[in-house]
Amino acid sequence: LVHPHFGGTLPYLTNRVEVYQRQGRWTIERPIGEYLAQFYTDTVSESPGALRMAIEAYGIQHILFASDFPYFPAGDGVRFVSQHLAPSDAREVFHGNACRLLGIESLVSA
C-alpha cells in the first residue's frame, strides 16, 4: 500500500489515534504506528516538515519518489528531495526503495 503525498494527514494523526487506542475507544491489535511503518508513501510535497514526519512514520526505506505531474513538476520534486536528504537517502528514495518494493534490479549504479 502506498499512501500518496507523504501520507496526507495520517502520519500527523498517528499519535492521536494511539491515544484513543490506549483509552479503549479503538480496539486494534497493535499501535497504529506499527501498521503505518509497513506501508509506503511518496514525496509529493514541498514541505520539509512533512518529509521529516514521513521519515519518522514510514522510515526512509519506505519513501518513494513521485512527481504528481503535471501538477507538481518532476524537476521540482527532484530538487526538493536532493536538497532535504543526504545523498545516500536520496538515492534510495529516487530508485532503491522502489526497486526493492517491486522486486526488480536497479539499472542505476550506486
Image (cartoon, rainbow, N blue to C red):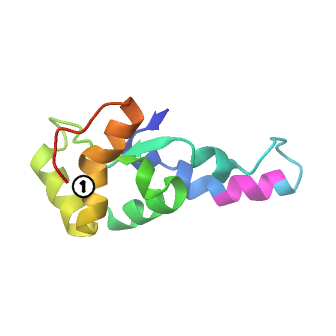
Q: Nearer the viewer, residue 13 or 96?
A: 96
Image coordinates of residue 58 in percent, x first then y, are: 50, 52
Residue visible at 18% across and 39% down in the picture:
71
22 lies left or right of 31? right
Q: Nearer the viewer, residue 46 or 31?
A: 31
Q: How many marks?
A: 1
Q: Nearer the viewer, residue 69 or 81?
A: 81
Magenta segment boundaries in residue numbering: 15-21
Quadrant where the C terminus is found in the figure: bottom left
Residue visible at 39% across and 67% down in the picture:
49
16 lies left or right of 11? right
Residue type, label 1: Arg
Q: Is residue 10 above or below residue 90?
A: above
Q: Nearer the viewer, residue 48 or 31?
A: 31
Q: Main secondary structure of the magenta part?
A: helix
Secondary structure category for the residue under label 1: helix
Give the residue furthest to the left.
Answer: 75
Residue visible at 24% across and 39% down in the picture:
106
Is residue 17 inside the magenta stretch?
yes
100 lies left or right of 71? right
* Disc 1 target residue: 91
Asked if one can make out residue 65 in the rendered structure from this viewpoint, the answer is no
Q: Is residue 87 above or below residue 93?
A: below
